[in-house]
Image: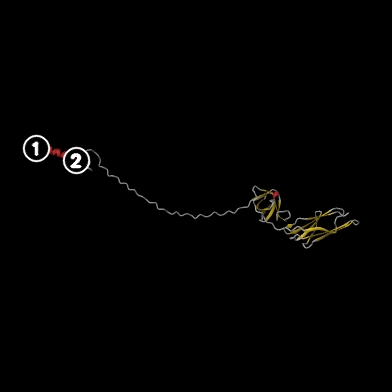
Amino acid sequence: MKASKEFKFAVIALLLATLACNMPGTVSSEGGDSPAAEPEVTYVVIVENTATTIPTDTPIPPTATPDLPPELNLSKNSNCRLGPSEFYVVVDQIASGTDLPVIGRSEDNEWWQVLNATGRECWIYFENVRTNQDLSGMSIGEAPPLPGIPLSFFVADQICQPGPKKFTVTLSWSSGGGETAFRIYRDGKRLIELKPNKFNYKDTNAPFNKNLTYEIEAVNENGTSEKAIQIVPACK
């Protein structure tokens, strides 16, 4: 009887031990397992980006670079005139090899308006220059006025005296406008310069026995006009 009680007690103890092993959170020391690790908790930190204003320098507009005029180079020593023709006075003489800024052209593209070393405007003939730029787009330059060609230039009178071989020729003309003087030439040689209110001239020493060529030009501070011409047959 006593043995039967002990046997029941042993069975109950075995059942209790078995239940204890299967209970959650209970770890048997007999199996040699280490205690269950506690679950790891990961904390996620969210950082919201806050827009930060970055100071910027106010852009400075670029300084405008002035357009420089094109240049030409003199291929020979050249006269630089007050206007675009040989009737204008020479204001400068410039050496070959000089570079000059171009600021204008003549209507026929045969003269270039330039600035000389002192900054004065003057004109160079196109055959005296060289350039690697197209200058045809340059604006037409301005030049001061020349006097007008003397009008109605003619032989008003001529006296031929074969005996003493004396020949007198009287010339007459009228104003073409803008002149400060008139110049008379015979056979290319200047005879006289007259005041602007003088409109006739008597050549009392005209050469005898030869045809004569008389020319007249008007003059002002800018240059001269074209010449008017009269040819006089020889006095024989």
Residue 12: x, y in percent?
15, 39
**Depth check, front residue: 130 or 99:** 130
Q: Disc 2 marks which amino acid? A: Leu
The quadrant in which residue 192 appears is bottom right
Kindly state the secondary structure of the residue where label 1 is placed: helix
Q: Residue furthest right?
A: 163
Instruction: Name the residue that disc number 1 marks.
Output: 2
Identify residue for label 2. Answer: 19
For the residues bearing labels 1 and 2, Cβ distance under 8 angstroms: no
Residue 15 visible in the picture: yes
Q: Amino acid at mark 1?
A: Lys
Residue 200 appears left or right of 146: right
Find the distance from the CA under tag 1 to the CA under tag 2. Answer: 26 Å
Q: Position of residue 23 (x, y in %)?
A: 21, 42
Residue neighbourhood size for the residue with mark 1, other residues' Cα within 10 Å, grouped as few (<14), some (14–19), many (≥20): few
Q: Looking at the image, is 128 positioned above or below residue 155? A: above
Give the number of marks. 2
Residue 116 seen in the current view: no
Q: Secondary structure at mark 2?
A: helix
